[in-house]
Image (tube, rainbow, N blue to C red):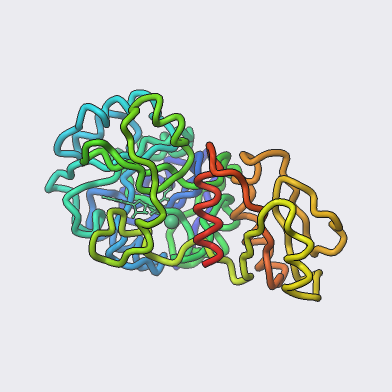
C-alpha cells in the first residue's frame, strides 16, 4: 500500500481516508495515534494488522466533543464526569461501560470502552472532519517505543497504512493516564500524562497504579495491554540509580561508544558515550525518552543507559515505561 503524507493544512483529505474505512496516523499531545472509524469494525481490524497487535489488547476511542460520548458509552458514572470536566481535553483516558454498538474488535470483547478527548488541535479537527469517533492506539509497530514524531510513524508503518499527518513532535512524549471509572473507587490502570497527584485533587479515594497488574497473566488483568512487551528498542535498556553509573559501567561493558545515555544529570564522563541526552527536568526526559530509544537503534547502539527518577508526578509514568522497556 502506498502511504500518503499530509500537512496540517490537508486534514480534509486525511479525514476522507478515515471515512472510506482506511487508517490515518495523526499527532496528539501525548504520542502519535493510528486512527480508524471506531464504528466501522472492518476499519478497526486493519489497525491490528498494520501494528501486528494482539487482538486481545483493546483500543482507546478518541472523541472531539463530550457529546460524542453517547455514541460509545452506555452510561457515565458521576466520578467519570468529574474527571472529564477537570482533565478533558487532555491526556486522560476514562474506562466506561460500553454501548453494544461499539464493535468488540475495539474493546477486545470487554464490556467496557476506553475514551479520550485529546487536546491537540490537529487531532480534534481530524475527528470533527471524519464525523466519527476514532479508535486509535499509539502509531508504532506492536512492542516498539511509541512514536513521538511523524518520522517515527513513517519508520514503523510506511507502506502498511493509508495516511500519515506530518505534525510537530508531541509535547508530553508519554501516553495518556488510563483510569477505570467503572469501579468504586476508580483506579489508575496506566500512569501517564495526568499525574496521580492531580487525579487525587478531584477524587481523593482513587487507587494508584500498581505494577503488580501487569505481572499477572490473562486472568484478572484489568487493562489487557499491560501484559504485553512494550516500549522496547533493539538496544538493551538499563535503568540505573542516580549517582551509581560509574560502577555500573565498569561492570557492564567496555565498548562505550555503543552506549547511549539519557537522564537529568550529566554523566561524570560524557565523552565515553556515543550520545548523551541530558534533560533539564523530568518533563523533558519524558518528552525525549522514546525518541532517544529510536535514535539509539538507528545508530546501532547496543545499550541505552537511563537514569532512574523519583516516582512523583510524571516520574511515575516515566519509571513505568523504563521498567517495561528494560524487562
Ligand atoms: O496517549 C494515548 O493514550 C495514546 C494516544 C494515541 O491517544 N494511545 C495509546 O493507545 O497509548 P494504546 O493502544 O497504545 O494503549 C491503550 C491502553 C492499553 O494499555 C489498553 O489495554 C488500555 O488502554 N485499554 C483500552 N481499552 C481498555 C478497556 N476497555 N479497559 C481497560 N483498559 C483498556
Ligand atoms: Mg501503545
Most extreme residue toward the left, as rendered? Answer: 100
Residue 130 appears in the picture as rendered: no
Identified at 53% across, 53% down, the residue is 5
Q: Position of residue 45 (x, y in %)?
A: 28, 62
Identified at 63% across, 70% down, the residue is 235
Foreground pick, 248 / 158: 248
Foreground pick, 266 / 61: 266
Locate ligand 2 by image quadrant: bottom left
**What quarter of the picture does the N terminus occupy?**
bottom left
Q: Position of residue 291 (x, y in %)?
A: 63, 55
Identified at 45% across, 29% down, the residue is 198
Q: Position of residue 321 (x, y in %)?
A: 52, 54
Q: Say if 313 sits above or below 204 in the image.
A: below
Viewed as shown, does residue 94 lie left or right of 310?
A: left
Identified at 43% across, 61% down, the residue is 161
Most extreme residue toward the bottom, as rendered? Answer: 254
Residue 104 appears in the picture as rendered: yes
Foreground pick, 9 / 227: 227
Q: Say if 113 sits above or below 53 in the image.
A: above
Viewed as shown, does residue 130 lie left or right of 298?
A: left
Q: Say if 59 sits above or below 71 in the image.
A: below
Q: Position of residue 224 (x, y in %)?
A: 31, 59
Amino acid at each position: 500500500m502506498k502511504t500518503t503524507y499530509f500537512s496540517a493544512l490537508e486534514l480534509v483529505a486525511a479525514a476522507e481516508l478515515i471515512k472510506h474505512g482506511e487508517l490515518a496516523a495523526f499527532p496528539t499531545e501525548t504520542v502519535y495515534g493510528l486512527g480508524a472509524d471506531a464504528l466501522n469494525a472492518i476499519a478497526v481490524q486493519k489497525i491490528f494488522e498494520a501494528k501486528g497487535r494482539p487482538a486481545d489488547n483493546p483500543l482507546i476511542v478518541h472523541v472531539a466533543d463530550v457529546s460524542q460520548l453517547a455514541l460509545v458509552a452506555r452510561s457515565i458514572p458521576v466520578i467519570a464526569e468529574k474527571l472529564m470536566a477537570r482533565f478533558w481535553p487532555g491526556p486522560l483516558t476514562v474506562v466506561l461501560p460500553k454501548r453494544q454498538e461499539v464493535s468488540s474488535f475495539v474493546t477486545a470483547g470487554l464490556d467496557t470502552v476506553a475514551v479520550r478527548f485529546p487536546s491537540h488541535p490537529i487531532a480534534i479537527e481530524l475527528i470533527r472532519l471524519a464525523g466519527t469517533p476514532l479508535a486509535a492506539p499509539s502509531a508504532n509497530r506492536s512492542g516498539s517505543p511509541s512514536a513521538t514524531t511523524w518520522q517515527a510513524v513513517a519508520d514503523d508503518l510506511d507502506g502498511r497504512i493509508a495516511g500519515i499527518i506530518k505534525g510537530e513532535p508531541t509535547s508530553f512524549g508519554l501516553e495518556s493516564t488510563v483510569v477505570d471509572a467503572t469501579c468504586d473507587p476508580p483506579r489508575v490502570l496506566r500512569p501517564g500524562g495526568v499525574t496521580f497527584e492531580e487525579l487525587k485533587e478531584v477524587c481523593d479515594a482513587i487507587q494508584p497504579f500498581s505494577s503488580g497488574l501487569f505481572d499477572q497473566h490473562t486472568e484478572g488483568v484489568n487493562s489487557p495491554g499491560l501484559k504485553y512487551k512494550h516500549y522496547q528498542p533493539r538496544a538493551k535498556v538499563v535503568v540505573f540509580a542516580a549517582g551509581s553509573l560509574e560502577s555500573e559501567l565498569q561492570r557492564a561493558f567496555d565498548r562505550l561508544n555503543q552506549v547511549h545515555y539519557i537522564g537529568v544529570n550529566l554523566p561524570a564522563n560524557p565523552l565515553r558515550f556515543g550520545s548523551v541526552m541530558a534533560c533539564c527536568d523530568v518533563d523533558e526526559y519524558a518528552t525525549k525518552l522514546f525518541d532517544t530509544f529510536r535514535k539509539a537503534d538507528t545508530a546501532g547502539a547496543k545499550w541505552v543507559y537511563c537514569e532512574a527518577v523519583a516516582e512523583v508526578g510524571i516520574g511515575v509514568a516515566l519509571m513505568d515505561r523504563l521498567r517495561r522497556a528494560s524487562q
